[in-house]
Amino acid sequence: MPVNKNAMTRYLVLDELLSNRYHDYTLDEIVEKINERLIELGIGEVGRRCVEKDIAYLKGEQSPFFADIESYSADVFSGGRVVKKRCLRYKSPDFSIFKKEMSDEEKYLLSQTLSLLGVFDGLPQLGELNRLQKGLGKVDDRRIVSFTKNPLENSDLFGRLFSAIAQKQVVKLVYHTFADAISKQPILLHPYLLKEYNRRWFLFGAADRDNKLLSFSLDQIDSVEPMLAQPFRASKGELDEFFDDIIGVSYYADRPVEKVLFWVSERQKAYILTKPLHDSQVSYRGASEEQYRKLYPCFYQGAFFSIKCIENYELIRELCSYGSDLVVLSPMHIRDKVSDRVEAMLKEYRRIREYEG
């Protein structure tokens, strides 16, 4: 078979699909994926027969690839039910028709990348990553970057949720609240994203009943079960955009984005400048700074900042965390919440002082 540019494009897509150990592709799905790529490149679509010939060529003795491709049975959602279908993949998880010997520099870079990925306990791919890392042979395996790890009590849960998101599977969660760890509540969820914040992992997804975006700390999830017969609904837009206007993970669609103006002490202003509370943070200089000093003459030192975000629990907690080195100036309702939190804290400290005599 003559190998032209179009054929090589199909072989490239075939290689990606047949190498994928985390998705089961039928022949019809392979044809669909190949045509999607061809359309993107402005190349005409091909039929099932053409792809069958491509696969036969990759396997054939006249081919330079000698690909060992196996057919196997897998549970696949189709027509509203789970059925068994014949799928295709490389028999060996190590095989690729484009595999080449890596240079020492490439091995080193890959080893360091695998080392970084290794901090995510519970990933279903960790076994493959470890196998790949061993296959690199003896390389410099010094740890150069260190993360603060948050080992999950049930690390397998992270891996199962990761797989459900990657394979676009609806899941049935059984969870509890932090206030009541005994009562268990089930929910059908369309999972979209795993996000880490403040040493805790959160799952974001849409409830099946009303499509409302929900979040669950992985500490709250007691079990997860893939619902293969349930059609999956994709998220509307990029989920990361939800976090543009908040600090942390608590999102409220009915709350507006507000400008929060605050003062920071002389000793902490350099820290806030180099570690902003939010991506929208602004530091005031020149005429703007003088204007605020006239409005708030008690703050003759330090600096004035503002951020634009939605009020949530994490915002109030972050503003309180700097103690007397940060004072919220506006809006009034956020200033009052911070003030109330400080008053409650002071009350507890006074009570323990009275108790100690």
Image: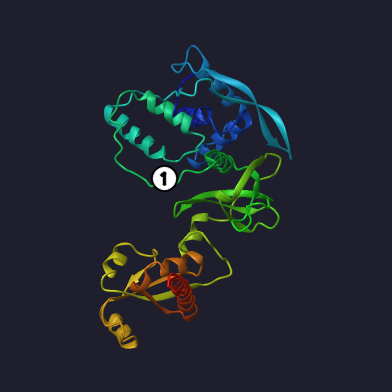
Q: Taking 305 as reference, is 107 above or below it?
A: above
Judging depth in this view, the residue of 98 and 135 nearest the camera is 135
Q: Residue at x 29, y 62 (%)?
A: 274
Q: Which residue is mark 1?
A: 149
Q: Mark 1, residues whose alpha carbon is within 10 Å: few (<14), some, or many (≥20)?
A: few
* Place of residue 185 in the rendered image (x, y in percent of width and height, measured from the top left): 68, 52
Judging depth in this view, the residue of 39 and 16 nearest the camera is 16
Image quadrant occupied by the C terminus: bottom left
Q: Taking 5 as reference, is 165 above or below it?
A: below
For mark 1, give the secondary structure.
loop
In the image, taking residue 6 as reference, residue 73 lies left or right, namely: right
* Place of residue 243 in the rendered image (x, y in percent of width and height, measured from the top left): 48, 60
In the image, taking residue 237 as reference, residue 109 lies left or right, namely: left
Residue lying farthest top? 61
Q: Taking 95 as reference, is 204 above or below it?
A: below
Q: Amino acid at mark 1?
A: Lys
Q: Residue at x 67, y 33 (%)?
A: 76
Q: Residue at x 49, y 11 (%)?
A: 61
* Place of residue 88 in the rendered image (x, y in percent of width and height, measured from the top left): 59, 25
In the image, taking residue 120 as reference, residue 283 lies left or right, namely: left
Q: Please tell me in which quadrant of the rendered image residue 324 appears.
A: bottom left
* Place of residue 100 in the rendered image (x, y in percent of width and height, measured from the top left): 36, 24
- Residue 118, visible in the rendered structure: yes
Q: Please tell me in which quadrant of the rendered image residue 231 appears.
A: top right
In the image, taking residue 250 as reference, residue 144 lies left or right, namely: left
Question: How many marks can you see?
Answer: 1
Residue lying farthest front? 357
- Residue 233, visible in the rendered structure: no
Q: Taking 87 as reference, is 41 above or below it?
A: below
